[in-house]
């Protein structure tokens, strides 16, 4: 391999920027063939910088037309032009630089920088997209005031948007018009945004606590504007919640959201002008599921919360990404928990962590929450930075308590508003505000890997004491063979034989605390906690609420688990007990062969179903066996087909053992005729109803298939329709095709619904799933250029259908590699993300290892492979 690939960037090489840009004026002339960007930068040398320090501006994939310094044109030789930017050797201490560049956004398939989606122009600048628009010190610690003028044809692009407030507009007599925007808040270039198009707008207002009126606007293509009501309501709830929970108000007079159909990620928090994937804005009962409604609310909240955690206080460099993302995901989780069922929210958060982050932490791409090096920063928008990062924030919250956490956040804003800072700064604010030493806690930022927490216990009836012995370890990860012990909160309760929480008094304390559980602070490799006045051996409920992102090892018996599943006062651990009960059985079946369902498990599920005090959404979670991905993580050598067969067998036996209960539950819930509302209560009931329908369809009878088809055809909302379609798509007969055809015919004009149609087929349990997916790549509705389509078909098949992806003939691997190669030339960021399932080849048997490795090697041999894919694949093979 003689090809040149980019070299890594290291966190420790950080240097302060030699020059700053206090303000700039941008002018965009947008057109179909080419776009001209004029930029005027007001630049100053920073204090203490050597006057001979050259000025470096990043720039890629554009044409430089003009460059002048203080009005004097520069010629090649006055400056140096390289593939990654331009430098000027000698510049004054203060000067104005004018730059004109030419772009072709209509050819930009990477969807970074300025590009076209549908008929509109839009931008994505995080992390390093601004350098594809103009030459600039494109790094987050350079913060500037932006004035942006957008010029375009008025008929085709009546709406022209950028950050901040609109200050002036006008018409030219050639049919073009212009709008000037001014953003009063200094910001890094990654928060710049521009939109131009023929868009419809939903407008509303919001009055902040201090009485300021803010205009709220959501823009989409005209045909979708009726699907934006939920997004608007979610935005208002987010604004209210941030005021109430954190005392944080919005700071501009206008807040805009634009929905675009081609988008690499979920959404982007550009100052005052969020740009969203349509998936997280548009929602109506007939085209969006309950989960879609929840996701819209969560992502709207997430991007809104970034206005403080990300925009007002931003990151010094991209190694600090979790400073804004971990904190904002945590805030989003708190918000969603407050809007619906906190227990179910927590269950889903932990499911995401375990299904996505734990495997990442156990694989070749494992990296700390604050990475030490990267080749392509886009590869580090990971579950580790986002979701484990959020768990780290949650641990501060658990260790310091609600009030202590809030003191820390307040101090963080007091110290750093308007600055670009580091994870260490956040930790220091938490420590200083609470007068605690968090130096050991900082290891959560630097050490990768999922720690293992081993707990053993001892009861002494003579002294009525109960002791927990806790030890921790962390497996080696790339570049980190030895780990130091972590500082973490272990929340525990002790449950007596009636299922009640015992008062908790540690040896040496004068009285028991008046709480059901308490937080034990773990700091050592080995530590013991002795509880006194414990009249009988209790059952420990450990790691309540999943108080730390660790793997817990405690020798629970099936009896213990059934008991906690029936009684634990902590809803998360109650769910967890059921999951452990099922996963212990499933792992045993996978290793030793499928057996008969133990009666206690059947009984436990039956009692949960009948439990009147539990809400429907919780029951639905509690009676669903652990995912195949989670089970896979528990195995030394993953047996994807074995896991699938065991899980299906469990579902089958539960279906048969409780057939009557499923039927009456289904009938009871299906007879509810109240109009669709996407609220927690309604969604929970639909969820439970559809879980029941799922068990019924495990009976594989013709009448059950008819029941499914009836629900599919008569459903009045997408949740019920899609749930039935997914079950039908799992069946081997022709009915699957009938339903799929009807669905497509009905919804072919709704791209987000067509995505669901692709996803359902990609995740089908049918034996011919891969053949169908391969055929669907040629379907006229499939587009390799559209990230949502790629995720719905290729991503879903390779990541969420392990039994078919890991087919013994290796065809799933070949399919994925072919598509990574095809996509790499179009959109390397998305191509690199697809590679994750292949990167974990070492976890499988030797035959699969060989097959997966061959595909990785084939990808690596591709001509002109992007840095994005090259980094993932070469690290996977290393
Ligand atoms: N900051 C965005 C968020 O809210 C993510 C944007 C990342 N985009 C990218 N191309 N890496 O999470
Ligand atoms: Zn974010």
Image (cartoon, grey):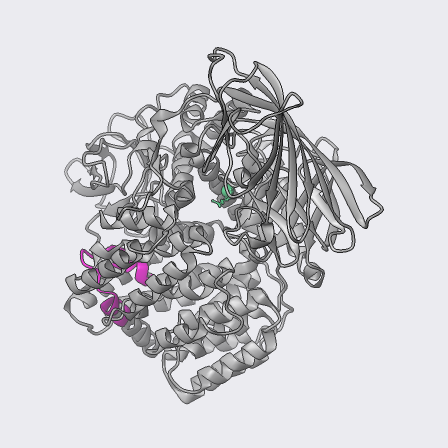
Residue nearer the viewer, 394 or 287: 287
Q: Is residue 470 left or right of residue 759?
A: left
Residue at the spot 35% in from the left edge and 48% down from the top edge: 357
Residue nearer the viewer, 667 or 781: 781
The location of residue 277, given as percent across then percent down, is 56, 54
Query: Magenta residues: mostly which secondary structure?
Result: helix
Res 364 visible: no
The location of residue 257, given as percent across then percent down, is 65, 47
When the figure is inspected, residue 233 is found, relative to residue 148, above or below; the finding is: below
The location of residue 764, given as percent across then percent down, is 39, 73
Q: Which residues are magenta?
A: 627-645
Q: Is residue 517 left or right of residue 264?
A: left
Residue at the spot 25% in from the left edge and 36% down from the top edge: 533
Residue at the spot 59% in from the left edge and 50% down from the top edge: 105
Looking at the image, the residue that sits furthest to the right is 173
The location of residue 428, given as percent across then percent down, is 42, 22
* The image quarter in which residue 672 lies: bottom right
Res 605 visible: yes
Residue nearer the viewer, 115 or 398: 115
Residue at the spot 52% in from the left edge and 60% down from the top edge: 786
What is the count of numbered marks?
0
């Amino acid at each position: 391999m003689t090809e040149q690939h980019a070299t890594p960037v290291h966190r420790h090489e950080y240097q302060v920027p030699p020059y700053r840009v206090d303000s700039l004026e941008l002018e965009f002339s947008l057109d179909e063939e080419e776009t001209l960007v004029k930029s005027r930068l007001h630049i100053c040398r920073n204090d203490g910088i050597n006057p001979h320090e050259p000025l470096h501006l990043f720039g890629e994939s554009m044409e430089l037309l003009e460059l002048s310094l203080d009005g004097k044109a520069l010629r090649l030789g006055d400056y140096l032009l390289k593939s990654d930017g331009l430098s000027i050797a000698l510049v004054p201490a203060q000067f104005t630089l004018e730059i004109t560049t030419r772009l072709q956004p209509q050819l930009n398939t990477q969807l970074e920088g300025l590009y076209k989606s549908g008929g509109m122009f839009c931008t994505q600048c995080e992390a390093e997209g601004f350098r594809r628009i103009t030459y600039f010190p494109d790094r987050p610690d350079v913060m500037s005031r932006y004035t942006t003028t957008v010029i375009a044809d008025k008929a085709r692009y009546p709406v022209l948007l950028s950050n901040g407030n609109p200050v002036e507009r006008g018409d030219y007599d050639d049919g073009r018009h212009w709008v000037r925007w001014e953003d009063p808040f200094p910001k890094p270039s990654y928060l710049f945004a521009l939109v131009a198009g023929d868009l419809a707008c939903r407008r509303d207002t919001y009055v902040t606590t201090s009485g300021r009126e803010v205009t709220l606007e959501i823009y989409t293509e005209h045909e979708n504007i009726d699907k934006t009501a939920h997004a608007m309501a979610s935005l208002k709830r987010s604004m209210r919640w941030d005021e109430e929970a954190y005392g944080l108000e919005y700071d501009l007079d206008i807040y805009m959201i634009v929905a675009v159909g081609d988008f690499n990620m979920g959404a982007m928090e550009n100052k005052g002008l969020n740009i969203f994937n349509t998936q997280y804005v548009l929602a109506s009962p007939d085209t969006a599921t309950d989960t879609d409604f929840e996701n819209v609310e969560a992502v709207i909240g997430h991007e809104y919360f970034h206005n403080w955690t990300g925009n007002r206080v931003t990151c010094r460099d991209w190694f600090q990404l979790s400073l804004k993302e971990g904190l904002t995901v945590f805030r989003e989780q708190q918000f969603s928990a407050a809007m619906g069922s906190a227990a179910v929210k927590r269950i889903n958060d932990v499911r995401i962590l375990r299904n996505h982050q734990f495997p990442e932490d156990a694989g070749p791409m494992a990296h700390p929450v604050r990475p030490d090096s990267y080749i392509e920063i886009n590869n580090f928008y990971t579950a580790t930075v986002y979701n484990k990062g959020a768990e780290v924030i949650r641990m501060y919250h658990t260790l310091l308590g609600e009030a202590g956490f809030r003191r820390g956040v307040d101090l963080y804003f007091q110290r750093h508003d308007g600055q670009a800072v580091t994870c260490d700064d956040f930790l220091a604010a938490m420590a200083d505000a609470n007068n605690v030493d968090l130096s050991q806690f900082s290891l959560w930022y630097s050490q990768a890997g999922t720690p293992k927490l081993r707990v053993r216990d001892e009861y002494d009836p003579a002294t009525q004491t109960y002791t927990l012995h806790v030890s921790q370890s962390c497996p080696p990860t790339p570049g980190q063979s030895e780990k130091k012990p972590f500082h973490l909160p272990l929340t525990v309760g002790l449950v007596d034989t009636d299922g009640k929480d015992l008062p908790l008094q540690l040896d040496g304390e004068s009285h028991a605390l008046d709480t059901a559980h308490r937080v034990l602070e773990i700091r050592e490799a080995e530590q013991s906690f002795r509880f006194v006045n414990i009249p009988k051996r209790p059952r420990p409920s450990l790691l309540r609420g999943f108080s730390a992102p660790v793997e817990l090892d405690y020798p629970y018996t099936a009896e213990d688990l059934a008991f906690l599943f029936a009684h634990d006062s902590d809803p998360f651990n109650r769910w967890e007990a059921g999951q452990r009960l099922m996963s212990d059985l499933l792992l045993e079946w996978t290793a030793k062969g499928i057996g008969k369902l133990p009666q206690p498990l059947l009984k436990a599920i039956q009692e949960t179903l009948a439990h009147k005090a539990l809400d429907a959404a919780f029951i639905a979670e509690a009676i669903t066996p652990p995912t195949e991905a989670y089970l896979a993580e528990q195995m030394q050598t993953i047996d994807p087909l074995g896991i699938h067969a065991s899980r299906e067998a469990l579902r089958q036996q539960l279906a048969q053992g409780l057939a009557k209960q499923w039927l009456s539950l289904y009938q009871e819930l299906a007879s509810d005729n109240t109009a669709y509302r996407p609220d927690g209560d309604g969604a929970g009931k639909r969820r439970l109803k559809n879980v029941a329908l799922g068990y019924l369809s495990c009976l594989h009878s013709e009448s059950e298939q008819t029941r499914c088809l009836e629900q599919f055809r008569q459903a009045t909302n997408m949740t019920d329709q899609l749930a039935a379609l997914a079950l039908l798509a799992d069946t081997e007969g022709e009915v699957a095709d009938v339903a799929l055809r009807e669905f497509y015919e009905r919804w072919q004009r709704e791209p987000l619904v067509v995505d669901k149609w692709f996803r359902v087929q990609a995740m089908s349990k049918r034996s011919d799933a891969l053949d169908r997916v391969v055929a669907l790549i040629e379907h006229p509705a499939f587009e390799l250029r559209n990230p949502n389509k790629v995720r719905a078909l290729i991503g879903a098949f390779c990541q969420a259908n392990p039994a078919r992806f890991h087919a013994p003939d290796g065809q799933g691997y070949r399919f994925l590699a072919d598509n990574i190669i095809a996509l790499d030339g179009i959109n390397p960021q998305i191509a690199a993300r697809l590679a994750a399932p292949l990167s974990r080849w070492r976890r499988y048997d030797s035959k699969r290892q060989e097959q997966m490795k061959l595909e990785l090697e084939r990808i690596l041999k591709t001509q002109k492979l992007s840095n994005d894919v090259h980094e993932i694949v070469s690290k996977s093979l290393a």
